[in-house]
Amino acid sequence: MRKTTEVYNSPFPYVYFENMYSNDRLAEICDELDFYSRNRQRYFTNKTRPATDDEGISLKENKAFFLHHLINPQAQDSSACAKYTLDHLANPKAFPVESKYFNRFRPECSGFLISYYTNGDYYHAHSDDSVASLVIWIYKEPKKFEGGEFIFTDYPEVKIPTNNNCAVMFPGRIRHQVNEVKMEENDNGFGRYSLTVFLDNPRR
Ligand SMILES: [Fe+2]
């Protein structure tokens, strides 16, 4: 399966990637995510400074943690998630010339968040502080959950297929949400992972 890239300039700029990682790399990434899930207490928390509403109430219910490997050059090789995502970002094709917004964008990665959504989890409409965000979805096949669609809240006409091994890159200020995930409670590890890379202008 070849990686494909679809560039959109309206109604706002975004880029959709299909087959983000090769099958071999995806298998390694899934093993790593399994490891984090098996050692859930050590890694996942639900205290990753979520976006909040005007009353300070969290807009999300999921488990997540920041993987510092991506921004720590010494540790990048020990994480398939970090290594292969950096490979993607190092390729100029990640910022297609056809994109009026992302063309020539050579960002720094300012954060790498791994999230896991299981039954009842969601992330209500919010925006990110980043210049741009790259969100990659990963789940085990056959898919055992429903919902979990990634939606641009202010642009219901934009349909983003939230498929395994696919990704979207968009300006962080564009509001987005994750619909509630529904699955059997005992389907441990069969929920919906997302890898979020926060991209910012290099510090001058
Ligand atoms: Fe977000």
Image (cartoon, grey):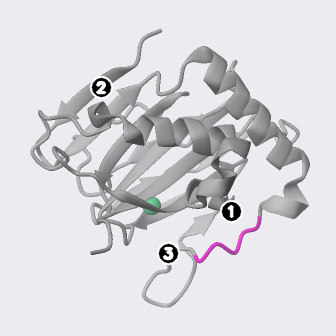
Q: Earlier in the sequence, mark 1 or mark 2?
A: 2
- Distance of mark 3 from mark 1, alpha carbons? 14 Å
State which region is magenta. Answer: 45-49
Which residue lies at the image location 34% right of the left edge and 45% below the top edge? 169
Residue marked by disc 1:
65
Query: In the drawing, does residue 144 fall left or right of residue 73?
Result: right
Element assignment for label 3? loop
Residue marked by disc 2:
5
Q: Is mark 3 within 8 Å of ligand 1?
A: yes
Image position, residue 127 (x, y; %): 36, 67
Q: Nearer the viewer, residue 119 or 19?
A: 19
- Residue type at mark 3? Ala
Element assignment for label 2? strand
Q: Nearer the viewer, residue 204 or 102?
A: 204
Residue marked by disc 3:
51
Image position, residue 189 (x, y; %): 80, 38
Image position, residue 203 (x, y; %): 32, 73
- Distance of mark 1 from mark 2, alpha carbons? 28 Å
Q: Is residue 121 visible?
A: no
Image position, residue 52 (x, y; %): 50, 80
- Residue type at mark 2? Thr
The crowd level at tag 1 (other Cα within 10 Å; few <14, some 14-19, many 20+) is some
